[in-house]
Image (cartoon, coloured by chain):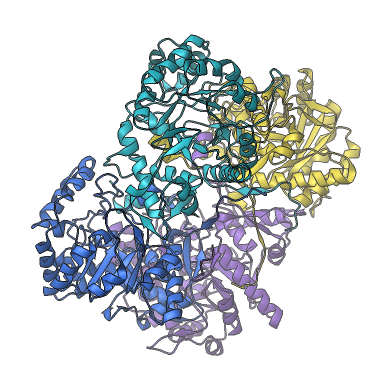
Chain colours: A blue, B purple, C yellow, D cyan
C-alpha cells in the first residue's frame, strides 16, 4: 500500500507450529545412533538436565550420569549458598504461592560459599559422573577456577542473553577467549538465538552454544520484557551458524536447544531444527530423583527487583529411567523420550543426529486445538 | 533479513483450515454418482472402515458390506489372538482409565493364531461380504498367504509410516513387487503422505495407497514423536502423485485418505483434496454394530515400550445405516455422511468423484471458533 | 518443495479477521447518507430482515417497514402452510432440544396453501409496507405469480447455493431471464459467493444478488458439507463482479451480504467489503417484535434427510427501534446498528455507501481473544 | 485464481503477535537512559497517564509528577463538571453493572463549568507537577484558552480518530495551525494510526502525535464500528511518518503509543515499534493513588446514543512507585515497568530510546496459548 516500512518483521516458529514429515526410506529404530559428543566428552544420549535448583543436586547428577545423560549443577544456587540445601528447597516447596517470590528473593541473597562449591563438585565426581557446572558471566572469573580445581569436567557460562561482547560500566566484560586460556575444560556458552551472535561466540573458541531465550515453562521473560524467540527458528538460525563456522574452519561446535521442550514431539522437533543436544528442565523436575519434590523454578525467578519466572508444580510423575528410556504406559509423549527420538529417526530414515539434520523435513502445521474435539470424541 | 536458512519450511493444511467453495453450475444431489472401484472390486460408497479392534469384527464387516461399504479386519489384533475376542474387548472396555494402556500391552502380547485368522476370513465370506484384511509389513510374508488361502479379497499392508524401501538389520524388508507376485488379490499399502513416496509405492504395482500420518483422533503419533502431516496437504500431494503416475502409465491407482475425518464436512474436504475413498475410524466406533460398545483405540496403542494412542470413548450414537445414509435429525455433520457428500457434490456441480476432484475449489478459511458466539447466540 | 500442486489454495477472510482503518479526512456522522435503492424501491436504511419464520410475519414486516427497513417473508414456511402460524411457532419454541429437529421435519412437511400466500402478502400491503417475499428456485414458477398477483413488491429467489445454471433430471431448471419476463417486480437472487457466478447472475437481468454461503449463526452447512466461504472475501469477490458488470453495461446491480452479521462491527465490515445492503437474521430474532419469542432457526433446518442448522435461542434483548437506531446503553455493538454505521462512515470520511466502498481501507487484523485478558482486567 | 480484487488487504500486527529479538551486543540495564522530551518538557520516564476520570485527578497528577511521569487531566469529565468529583466517581463505582452505562450517560450530561477547569489546573500546578490537560477537537477553541490562562503546560487534543482535516456541517473544523498560534504551550494531537495522517498532523506544527485507534482494554470501538488498527503496525506506520518528517524538516515530533499496553512486554514492544513515549490507562487504574478505586472506564463510554466502552474492574493491585520502578515480587510483567524497559534495552544493547528504535529487531511470533500447558505443568 506504499507505506514506508519503519522496520522489517520476520516470521518465527515454535514447536507447536511445526511437525516433522516422514522420510522417503524408513529404518528400524534399533539401527539409529543417538550419541552426543562435545570436545571429547561422549554421552549415550543427547540430553542435558538444566542447572535448576529443583532438579540438579549431586545425587541427581550421579544418577543421571549412570543413565548416560549429563546434569549441570548451578554454582550460584542453593547448593553453593547453604550447607544443607535440601532444607532450603523444602522451605520453598512448602511456601504458600503468594509468598514464594519474596521468599526466593530472600533465600537467594545469602552469600555463595566457595568451599561448598568445591564440595559439590567432588560429590559428583565421587559418584563417577561427568561433572558439569553453571555460572553467570559476571561471576565466571571468580567461580570457574574453583570448580575446575575441584575437578569439574565441563563449564556452562549462562545468562538469559549472552553475546561475545557485553558492555558494563562497573566491570570489564567477560572475554571468552581469555576464559578458555584460563580453564582447560570444555566451555558451553549461552543463551543466544541469532545467527550472528552464535557465529561470533563460536569464533571465540567455545565448545558449545546454548540456544533459547524466553521459551521455557518456568520463565516469563517474554511477558515481562517482550524479549523471546520461538525455538524452531532460534535453533535453525544457530544451526546455520554452526554449518557456516564448520565450513570455514573445520571445527564442529555443537548447539544445544534449551527451553520449551515438554514432550517427545518437542524434543524430536528440536533435533529436526538442527540441535545436536537438548537441555531440559521441567520434565526432569517431574522425576522422583529431583530434589524439588515435583516443583520447579527458573534461574531468573529470584531476581531482586524484576523476577522473570515463578515456581511451578508439575508434580512427581515418573523416574529418570522411565522418562529417558521407558518402558511407558503414557501415550502423551511425556515418557521414553529417547524411544520417541529413535522411532522418529526411524520414520525419517536417519541413522544418527547429523543424518537426521539432513533428512528431517519440517512443515508448518499448527497443532490442532483438540480440547473440544476430545470432549466430543470421548477422550477420557 | 539475510540469515542463511538451515532448511526450508513448507505450510501444510488440515481439514479445519479449509473449506469448499460452491461451483459455477449446480446439480441435483440425486444426479451424483459416488461409487468407488479398486482393481475390479466396486463399492456403492467410497468409505472403508478402519482395521481397528473396537470397530471391525466379522459381523460388522458383513453388515457394512450389505450397506455397500468395505470393512478391513485387523489380522494382528484380538480377532487373531483370542478364540473369544469379544470377551477381551469387554475386558478393555471395563478397565479403569489409569490401567488401560498397561492392559493393552498385556493383552496384545498373546500370540497370533493362524487357524483363527483363516476362521475369521471365512466368517466374513460366509456372510457374503467382500473380505479385506490388514497386516503390518513385518508380518506380511507370514500372514498374507493364510488370509489369501482362506479367501480374502483384498489385502492392506499398513503401518504408521510405510515406504517402498525399509531398512532393517534383523530381516530383509518387505518388497512389494514380490508380494504382488505371491498374492493374487488387490493390495493397498500405507500409510504415506508424500508425493515421492506415493509415486514410488505406485511404481511397485500396488493397487491403492493409504494416505495419512498422525491426524487420527485415537492416535498421538504427533505428540509422541513430532511426526505428522495435516490431511489436506497430505492428500493433495499423494493425489498429485496419482495424476503423474496415471499420466505416465495409464494405470489409475486410487488413494484413500485415512485418519482425522469426523464429520461430513471433513469427508467432503478429503474428496475435494483428491481422495478416491476415505478410511474412517471413530465415527464407526459410534455405531451400535461396532463391537467396542462406544469405545475405540488405535493400532499403535498397545506398543510395548512407546504407545502412541489411547482408548477414547465416543459413545454409541447411531447405526451404520444412519451414519452412512440417514435420514438424520442431527445437524452437526455426524450422520448421513453419503447424503452430505452428495449435497456437497451438487453444490459444486460434480457428477462423480473424478469430476469433484476437478471442480471442487478449496479455499483457506480457518474454522471459526464459535463457542463464545454460540453461547452469546443461545445455541442450546 | 518442488512438489507438483494438485490444486491451488486461496486464502479467504471473515469478519473476525479484518478491521477497518480510519480515513485521512473525517466527517460528522450526521453528514452521512445510508439510503439504499434497488430498482426504484428506496429504503431509509440498507438493512433487510432474513426470510426466517422466527423473524418475519406480516406484523413484523409492517413494523420494520415503518422504521425504513425491509423484511422478507418466507413463502415456503409456516406462514404459507398454516392458518395460525403463531401456534406452530409456539409449538417449536416449546419443544425440548432433543426433539426439535424431528419436529421441524414433521411441521414443515405440511402442504403450502396458495390462498394463505396471497393472504399474507395482502396483510403486509395493508400495513403500508413494501412487501418482499422469498421462494426457492424449485417452487418459483408456481409460487411467484401468486405473490405478484397479490401485490408483492419484491421477489427473492433464494437457496443455499444458486447459480444461473442448475442441472436437474426431474424438472427443467429455473431460467432467470424467463422469470423476469413473467414477473414485473424487482428480483433478488442468491445465495452466491463467487465473481463468475455473480457476474453470470447479473447478466440474466436480475436486480440484486444475495451474497453468502455457510456463515450464518443458525446454519451448519460448513460442518455438514464442508462448503462455505467467509463473508469478507465472498463480498469482495461479488463486489468486483458488480463493478465489472457496471463498467460493461452501465447498470448497477446491488449486492446484499447475507449471513454472519451479529454486531455493528460486522455490519460496517460488510459495507467496507463492498456490500450495498445487508441481510440479517439472528439480531432481528432478538427483538420483541419477532414472532419467535427469542428463538431462531434457519431455512435448511427442516431438511427431511440432511438438516443443516438448528434452533438457537438468542433471547429477547431489544426492540426494532433500539436495534436499528438506538439510543442504547449497550457497548458491545449489538444495538444502534445504523448509528454505528454512521459513526464508522464518519471516521472513514465517507458521505454515502458508494463513497464508503471507495474510502474504507480494510486491514487483516485477527480479533484479539480477550477472554483471559478481560478476566485479568476485571471486565464485569 | 484470476479473480479481480475489489480492494487490497494489508496484514497488521498487535502486541500479542510479535516479540523482540535480543541484540548482538548487550549492555548493563543501568547504562540505559529512558528520558523523554517534548518541546522542552523533559520527563524522567517516557510514560503518560491517560486522561481518564478513574485515573487522573489533581492529586494523582501531582504524585505521578513526583515520580517523573506525566498525567493528563480530562477537561470534559467529572473534574470539570462537578464541584466534588470524587462523589460522582464513587457513585459510578457503586452502581450495579446493568445500570452503569445509563448512569454514565446521565452523569456526563451535566454542564462543564469553566471555573472548575481553572481550579483543577491550579491544583496541579500548586503541587509542583507539569500540568497536562485533554480536550476534544469540538471543544478546543472554547476550553483550551481557559486551561492555558490557568497555567497548563501541555495540551492534548484528543478524539477517537483525529485528522488534520475534519468536515462538519455545523461548525468550522478545528485548524491546528490556528490553534498553535492561539496557545503558546506544546500541543499533542490524536489519535491517529496512519502514515499519511500522522505526516499531515506533523505538518500543521503540532508537537506530538498520539497513536492508537481501538486497542484499549476499556474501549470497544472495534466491536461497535469495526474500526481499529493493531498497535504494532499503527506505531510503525506513524514512526515512519516521524522519520520522513524529520528528514524533510529537521524537526523531531515524538509519537506516543496510546492503548492496549498492559504489561512490561507490551510496553517494550511499543518502543521497539518506534514509540517515543507511551500513554497507559488500565495499569494506572490499578494503583492505589487512582481515584477510581480499582475501576476504570474510557472516554467514549458515556456517549449518549452509541457508547463504545464499559466500566471494567481491574482492581487495586499496586502503587505508582511499584508499577513504575518496583521492586516487585510479581513475575507476570505487571509491575516495575521501567525496570522491564531497562532490562529489555540491555538485552538489545540500546543506550537510549532512539538507539532502541534502531537496534530492536521485531519478529512475528504469536504468543503461545499456555493455559492448557500451564495446567499440565502445574502453574499455581
Image quadrant for the N terminus of chain B? bottom right
Left or right of B201: which side holds A170?
left
Q: Residue at x 51, y 71 (%)?
A: B7
- x, y percent for residue D270: 47, 44
- Relative to C353, is B288 above or below? below
- Relative to B343, is C262 above or below? above
- Which is more toward the observer, A228 or B157? A228
- x, y percent for residue D39: 51, 33
- Relative to A224, is B48 above or below? below
Residue B221's quadrant in the figure?
bottom left
- x, y percent for residue A130: 20, 74
- Which is more toward the observer, A200 or D335? A200
Q: Residue at x 83, y 26 (%)?
A: C150
Residue D33's quadrant in the figure?
top left
**Residue farthest to the right?**
C181
Q: Residue at x 32, y 27 (%)?
A: D288
Amino acid at each position: 500500500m506504499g507505506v514506508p516500512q519503519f522496520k522489517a518483521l520476520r516470521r518465527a516458529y515454535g514447536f507447536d507450529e511445526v511437525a516433522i514429515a516422514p522420510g522417503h526410506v524408513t529404518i528400524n529404530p534399533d539401527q539409529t545412533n543417538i550419541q552426543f559428543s562435545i570436545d571429547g566428552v561422549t554421552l549415550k544420549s543427547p540430553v542435558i538436565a538444566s542447572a535448576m535448583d529443583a532438579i540438579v543436586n549431586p545425587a541427581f547428577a550421579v544418577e543421571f550420569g549412570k543413565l548416560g545423560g549429563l546434569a549441570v549443577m548451578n554454582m550460584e544456587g542453593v547448593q553453593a549458598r547453604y550447607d544443607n540445601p535440601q532444607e532450603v528447597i523444602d522451605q520453598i516447596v512448602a511456601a504458600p504461592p503468594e509468598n514464594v517470590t519474596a521468599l526466593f528473593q530472600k533465600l537467594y541473597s545469602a552469600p555463595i560459599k566457595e568451599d561448598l562449591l568445591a564440595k559439590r563438585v567432588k560429590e559428583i565426581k565421587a559418584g563417577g559422573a561427568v561433572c558439569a557446572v553453571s555460572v553467570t558471566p559476571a561471576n565466571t572469573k571468580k567461580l570457574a577456577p574453583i570448580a575446575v580445581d575441584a575437578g569439574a569436567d565441563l563449564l556452562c557460562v549462562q545468562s538469559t542473553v549472552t553475546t561475545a561482547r557485553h558492555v558494563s560500566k562497573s566491570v570489564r566484560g567477560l572475554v571468552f577467549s581469555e576464559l578458555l586460556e584460563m580453564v582447560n575444560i570444555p566451555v558451553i556458552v549461552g543463551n543466544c538465538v541469532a545467527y550472528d551472535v552464535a557465529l561470533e561466540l563460536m569464533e571465540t573458541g567455545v565448545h558449545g552454544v546454548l540456544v533459547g531465550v524466553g521459551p521455557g515453562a518456568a520463565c516469563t521473560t517474554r511477558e515481562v520484557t517482550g524479549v523471546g524467540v520461538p525455538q524452531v527458528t532460534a535453533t535453525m538460525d544457530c544451526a546455520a551458524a554452526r554449518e557456516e563456522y564448520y565450513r570455514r574452519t573445520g571445527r564442529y561446535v555443537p548447539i544445544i536447544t534449551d527451553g520449551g521442550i515438554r514432550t517427545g514431539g518437542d524434543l524430536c522437533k528440536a533435533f529436526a531444527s538442527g540441535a545436536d543436544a537438548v537441555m531440559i528442565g521441567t520434565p526432569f523436575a517431574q522425576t522422583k530423583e529431583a530434589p524439588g519434590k515435583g516443583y520447579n523454578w527458573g534461574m531468573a525467578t529470584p531476581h531482586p527487583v524484576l523476577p522473570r519466572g515463578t515456581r511451578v508444580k508439575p508434580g512427581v510423575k515418573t523416574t529418570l529411567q522411565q522418562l529417558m528410556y521407558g518402558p511407558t504406559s503414557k501415550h502423551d509423549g511425556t515418557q521414553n523420550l529417547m524411544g520417541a527420538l529413535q522411532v522418529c529417526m526411524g520414520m525419517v530414515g536417519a541413522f544418527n543426529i547429523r543424518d537426521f539434520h539432513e533428512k528431517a523435513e519440517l512443515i508448518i502445521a499448527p497443532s490442532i486445538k483438540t480440547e473440544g474435539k476430545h470432549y466430543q470424541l470421548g477422550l477420557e
